[in-house]
Amino acid sequence: MSEIHLTIDEREVTAEPGRTILQVAAANGIDIPHLCHDPRLSPTGACRLCLVEIEGQAGMHTACTRLAEPGMIVRTETEAVLRSRRSSLSLLLSEHNVACTTCDADGACLLQDYAYRYQAAEDRFPKLAGPSTETYTVGNQGIVYDPSKCVRCQRCVKICAEVEMAEALTFKGRALDIEVSTAFDLPLNDTTCELCGLCVSACPTGALWERAAKGQGRAKDLQVVRTTCTYCGVGCQMDANVDRRANRIVRVTAVPGTVPNDGNLCVKGRFGFSFVHSPERLRTPLIKENGAFREASWEEALALVGRRLAEIRDREGPEGIAFLSSSRCTNEENYLMQKLARAAGRTNNIDQCATT
Ligand code: SF4
Ligand code: SF4
Ligand code: SF4
């Protein structure tokens, strides 16, 4: 289908048919604010921050749900739009526990960002008390939910249903008491939750966070280091968020759009990194002598293994030795292992832990 032409903020842009105004604007570097939109999810149209004006059409329109049309003239920052955004943000702030100075999300929070960008007043509307602090994450080791920082954007609920397909989350309550919960208000541990952490990754504020990372460093102070998960051979891309002063990983995040995992991680990749700092972690090869281990260099350990394997092979024949590799290695590493087994060990006894 041929491209369509429209105008956004006095710029002529082209788009594939079927794209929303928000998508077309984003593709052309025009940042329309949004709290409930996430490119991984179906449109929601709940937060009202992406309202724009369209020439010749009355009122304002949500850019995240409205499709771009040929010849449309869209304005994203008119006086009326800016007034509406300020009001929406001030209303959100009136029912929000604005505690940015002690919040882990400080520096990575869209509400904070937009409140600053549009200079939304915190005290324009009377402060309203939020819902309970006893929530569905009580007792969960991975995730903690703070309803007083929740903007009810639905991203967590939708990503759990639409991407992870676990359908563990829902909303409970009405009006000011609405909060995220689970079916029958069960603790998260008793639901279909797979502890993938996608809900945390989708949250635009500090309402959902990794429990172990609470108080361990504000998002803006952490250094993000791209790395590859070591748990299996898929090679998921992840970001270690590191407290530079303590040289410790505080949390693990992942970026949508990266290959091969598109921002998804399993429970091990997202939450299972405390071993990195374990004092019991092996850091050097150990050689057992007279019933006790002693530390050795890699050169010494590898030479010993090679010598002993060759001795056994020459004494017992190729059936006397076997090589066992790991699904945590890459394809290339497993290829090299079978090469070693066959070429140097002269045996076909080669396998790895994921063989069923
Ligand atoms: S969630 Fe955002 S706006 Fe709320 S206290 Fe934390 S940083 Fe501030
Ligand atoms: S951790 Fe994953 S499965 Fe569990 S509630 Fe969050 S998104 Fe759903
Ligand atoms: S917890 Fe976060 S993602 Fe879920 S509704 Fe609240 S603000 Fe949105």
Image: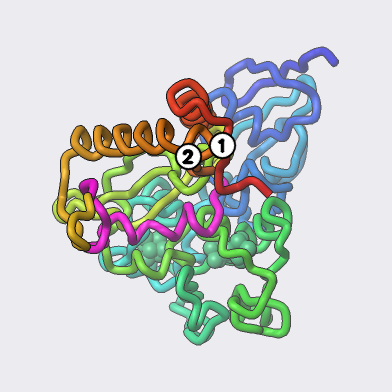
User: Residue 2's spot in the image, x, y percent?
Assistant: 82, 13
Give the left or right position of residue 210, taking residue 351 as reference.
left
> How many C-alpha atoms fall within 10 Å of the one at disc 1: few (<14), some, or many (≥20)?
some
> Is ligand 2 closer than 8 angstroms to the Cβ of mark 2?
no
From the viewer's perspective, tell me whether residue 145 is left or right of residue 285.
right
Residue 156 on image: x %, y %:
60, 61
| Residue 225, numbered label | none
* Residue 98: quarter of image: bottom left
Amino acid type at circle 1 is: Asn
Q: Which residues are magenta?
A: 264-286
Give the x, y percent position of residue 303: 25, 33
Query: Mark 2 sits on what residue?
Result: 321
Could you give the CA–CA distance between mark 1 and mark 2, rounded to whole angstroms?
A: 7 Å
Q: Residue 152 appears at what percent x and percent y?
A: 59, 66
Q: Circle 1 is placed at which residue position?
A: 349
Residue displayed at 52% across by 58% down:
203
In this rendering, is residue 352 above or below 270? above
Residue 250 in the magenta stretch? The answer is no
> Which quarter of the rendering shows the N terminus?
top right
Q: Nearer the viewer, residue 208 or 32?
A: 208
Amino acid type, mark 2: Ile
Q: Quadrant of residue 70?
A: top right
